[in-house]
Amino acid sequence: PPPPPHRYMTMPPVPPPAPSSRGGPPGPRGRSSSHPPPPPHSQPPGMSGTGGSASSSRGSSSGRNSVPPPSSSVPPGQSVTVSNSMGKVKHPFVKKASGVKWTKEEDDALRAAVEENGAKNWKLISQRLPDRTEVQCLHRWQKVLKPTLVKGPWTAEEDRKVMELVKKYGAKKWSLIASNLPGRIGKQCRER
């Protein structure tokens, strides 16, 4: 019987593009460009005069897709919603206190909000903390303030259970391991 056909065909080599009649390098796909290159200081259409940052409107004349320039004022704790050309929503002015340590007042406000609303609706809870996001509130609660967290020394039983769970799930499933140890979080298990 004849040998099976090859999976991949070999193609003949493609000859290099012919030199441009203008003497310069060829343009895209071997064709010479009929337009000279733009001067280095120009910007594409639709770009604002603010240095061509990500706040371009990409040619939108209505301005509904453009991000307000940095000089526009948005009250703290509020955001401007912007849809891009792909239909995705961006929040360019989102409240942030990233990297800023939590204060005792913020911790107290978070405890009160969780007591009032339960530890479920983090969007509602974060409204009580104007400089913190939902995710920041959730993480602060789950990893620091939650009353059921165990922060003391490890017991021999906990150590035995961690070793057993690492053998069962591997040394990368720390949240899963922690879910089997009441009061412990993944970071504590990993560091143990």
Image (spheres, rainbow, N blue to C red):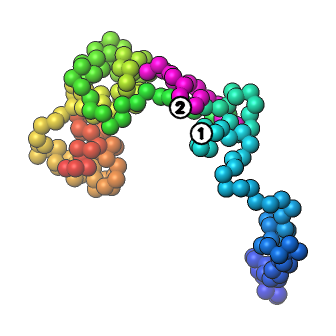
* Residue 28, x across and y down, in percent: 79, 65
Residue 63 located left or right of residue 179: right
Please name the predominant secondary structure of the magenta segment in the image.
loop
The part of the image, by quadrant, that contains residue 51 is top right
Q: Is residue 182 above or below residue 23?
A: above
Q: Are marks 2 and 1 in contact (CB under 8 Å)?
A: yes
**Residue closest to the eye, 125 or 169:** 125
Task: Count how many numbered circles sit on residues in the image.
Answer: 2
Question: Is residue 118 at all visible to an observer of this figure?
Answer: no
The part of the image, by quadrant, that contains residue 95 is top left
Residue 114 located left or right of residue 18: left
Which of the image's four quarters has the N terminus?
bottom right
Kind of residue at disc 2:
Pro
Residue carrying label 2: 70
Kind of residue at disc 1:
Thr
Q: Which residues are magenta?
A: 68-86
* Mark 1 crowdedness (10 Å alpha carbons): few <14, some 14-19, many ≥20: few
* Residue 43, x across and y down, in percent: 69, 47
